Amino acid sequence: MTWVELAAAVLSAWGVWLTARRRPWCWPVGLASVIVYAWVFVDAKLYSDALLQGAFGAMIVYGWVRWLQHLGDDGRVRIAALPPAQAAWHAALGALGAVLLGAFMHRWTDAALPWLDAALTAFSMVAQWWQARRHVAAWWLWIVVDVVYVGEYVYKHLLITAVLYAGFVSLAAIGLRDWRKAAACRATG
């Protein structure tokens, strides 16, 4: 499984790098990575993560279409504001999703870390939604989620993926910086 995990990691890193650069090619690269990672997570009995890959697949199609509708003259996606009330509503939905998915995984599967995996899955969906909607806040949420994922993957001995997610934290910080700068330029421009 190591070579499959490595291939998934490389595709994922490339996709996140393209996302941080606001390039729409991030979406097809991301689609390839979620297909490979679904296989990795089923093998590791991280079923919420495997389900997340399927949900990401659907969100990727949505995000790709959405981004193509909001490109600037430079070929990069334009940033959109996230109203605080909407952010709070999405966070509440993430928390509800975490509880419901965690309860299901705990009761009906042999998931290795049902509650933690479910919470990370639910909040990853919120972050992915925000990414598709072009919100800077997605990067803040990705940083938090990815830090916790590093610990989960170390615990499950998915070391390539743990290193990948440590790299995602750095890429998310770069994305946050660049997207904030783009949002500030848009606001003053």
Image (cartoon, rainbow, N blue to C red):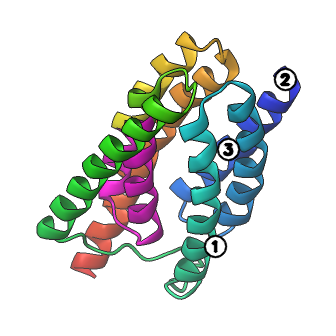
Q: Position of residue 15 (x, y in %)?
A: 66, 52
The residue depicted at 40 percent of the width and 28 percent of the height is 116
Q: Amino acid at mark 3?
A: Ser
* SS at badge 1: helix
Q: Identify the residue position indicated by label 1 in the image.
A: 61
Quadrant housing the C terminus: bottom left
Between the C-alphas of marks 3 and 2, the distance is 16 Å
Q: Amino acid at mark 1?
A: Val
* SS at badge 2: loop
Whether 58 is drawn above or below 34: the answer is: below
**Residue 159 horizontal side relative to residue 170, left or right:** right
User: Which numbered disc, 3 or 2, marks the residue closer to the eye?
Assistant: 2
Q: 31 or 74, which is in the foreground?
A: 31
Q: Position of residue 55 (x, y in %)?
A: 57, 58
Label 1 or label 3, whichever comes before in sequence order: 3
Whether 55 is drawn above or below 122: the answer is: below
Magenta highlight on residue 137: yes
Residue stretch in magenta: 118-143
Between the C-alphas of marks 1 and 3, the distance is 16 Å
User: Which numbered disc, 1 or 3, marks the residue closer to the eye?
Assistant: 1
Q: In the rendered structure, find residue 4 and report the number of the disc placed on it.
A: none
**In which image quadrant can residue 2 be found?**
top right
Q: Amino acid at mark 2?
A: Met
**In which image quadrant can residue 101 be found?**
top left
Q: Residues within 10 Å of mark 2 (few under 14, many from 20)?
A: few
The residue depicted at 31 percent of the width and 72 percent of the height is 185
Q: Position of residue 186 (x, y in %)?
A: 31, 77
Whether residue 61 appears in this view of the structure is: yes
Q: Identify the residue position indicated by label 2 in the image.
A: 1
Quadrant housing the N terminus: top right
Q: Residues within 10 Å of mark 1 (few under 14, many from 20)?
A: some
Q: Identify the residue position indicated by label 3 in the image.
A: 12
